[in-house]
Amino acid sequence: PRWCQELQQAAADPLDAVAYPNIVYTAHFYAWSHKELYRSKVEKAVLGDAYVGGPHREKPWQPDERHAQIPVMVTEWGAAGHWGGGKIKRDEVEAWMRMLDALGISHVAFSLVDKDETDSALRPGADPRGAWTPASLTPAGDIYRSTILADELRERALHIRRTARDHDTPA
């Protein structure tokens, strides 16, 4: 089976969460190759009975732990095709990020290399030691960077809201 793309199979017969409390299921997506149909499979695997289907709303629901079926992490994703080529699909990346954010799913972008292909983050010849400038990034690399920065800003905003809430609570 293609476990990273057919999560409904794992959700239909998940491992025992008591016996295996530290298990997470993995999903992979490439924006050119995996669109709404695959997003709905991930959504259904995570939400189970709470799944309502359809394109992701402007103001998404909040997942309810009572309905969560399996924990998921996207351990590989790209802005173009699953083979490294194809066209960059920024709109699909954005749709994926909205869904992942709404479901609280972590993700890791692929591929931090300077290979001459669409999904590579770095331009050929980029310094392998790091310290990359925006000019070192490919268009896909720019999307990966923007996504990481957006995630960081969301986390900072959540921290500020939590801190403010904690300080506003009467003693």
Image: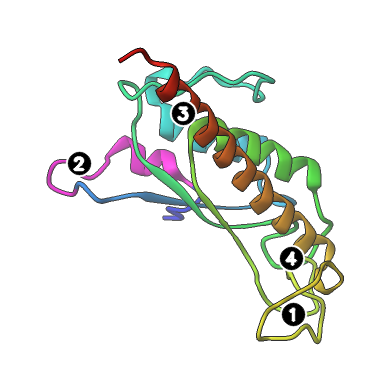
Judging by the rendered image, the residue that carries numbered circle 3 is 162
Lower position in the chain sequence, tag 2 or tag 4:
2
Front disc: 1 or 2: 1
Residue 114: mark: 1
Lower position in the chain sequence, tag 2 or tag 3:
2
Judging by the rendered image, the residue that carries numbered circle 2 is 17
Judging by the rendered image, the residue that carries numbered circle 4 is 119
Residue 165, above or below 20 = above
Lower position in the chain sequence, tag 1 or tag 2:
2
Tell me the residue at 49%/47% (across/down). Answer: 106
Badge 2 element:
loop
Kind of residue indicated by mark 1? Asp
Mark 3 vs mark 1, CA separation in Å: 40 Å
Front disc: 2 or 3: 3
Secondary structure predominantly adopted by residues drawn in magenta: loop
Q: Position of residue 44 (x, y in %)?
A: 47, 30
Q: Where is residue 101 in the image (x, y as percent from the top left)?
A: 57, 36
Q: Is residue 146 left or right of residue 168?
A: right
Badge 1 element:
loop
Mark 4 vs mark 1, CA separation in Å: 10 Å
Q: In which quarter of the image is the N terminus?
A: bottom left
Q: What stretch is highlighted in magenta?
A: 6-20
* Label 2 environment density (alpha carbons within 10 Å; few <14, some 14–19, many ≥20): few
* Label 1 environment density (alpha carbons within 10 Å; few <14, some 14–19, many ≥20): many
Tell me the residue at 20%/41% (across/down). Answer: 17
